[in-house]
Amino acid sequence: MGQEERLNHWSKVLYNGMRWAGEDGKEEISIFDQKLIRDLRTFDSSIDAILPTVITQLAVMWLEEPEEFVSKVNEQCNTAYTVDISYLNGRFHKIPSPKKKSKWWHVFGRKT
């Protein structure tokens, strides 16, 4: 599994876990604890390398301030992860508009 696939996989798994915790009436972030980190390391021995990005992605998905979210996770898990600034920079930069404007119907395979 490539890096991008791993990021997407773990983000989805943890997002679902958070959602299910919320559906059970718990605080969504309550899934993060030391046992979860141990379990993640069992499944993926190099998870620590991507967890800052995964946790930052989760903060964005839950519309939380990344610094606060990562801080809560660190407090609950007794870890020292940081916000992945490169993910935020890549995600929230201004995307330039295309130079050539095309007709909207090109989406349906129609020619002009």
Image (spheres, grey):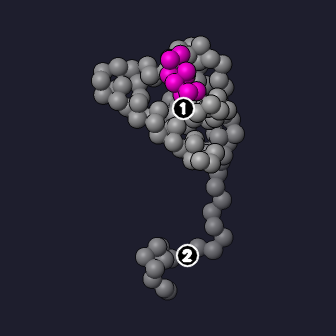
Give the residue pinned by disc 2. 102
Q: Is residue 53 a member of the stretch shown in magenta?
A: no
Mark 2 to mark 1: distance in Å?
Answer: 46 Å
Q: Nearer the viewer, mark 2 or mark 1?
A: 1
From this view, report whether residue 71 is shown above or below residue 42: above
Residue extending furthest toward the right: 86
Q: Which residues are magenta?
A: 33-42
User: Pointers 2 and 1 in contact (CB under 8 A)?
Assistant: no
Residue at the image point whose x is 35% and y is 26% from the top = 22
**Viewer-nearest residue: 67 or 43:** 43
- Position of 109 with respect to 53 (left or right) is left
Give the residue pinned by disc 1. 43
Residue at the image point whose x is 63% and y is 74% from the top = 100
From this view, report whether residue 6 is shown above or below residue 76: below
Query: Exactly how many numbered labels are in the figure?
Result: 2
The image quadrant that residue 53 belongs to is top right
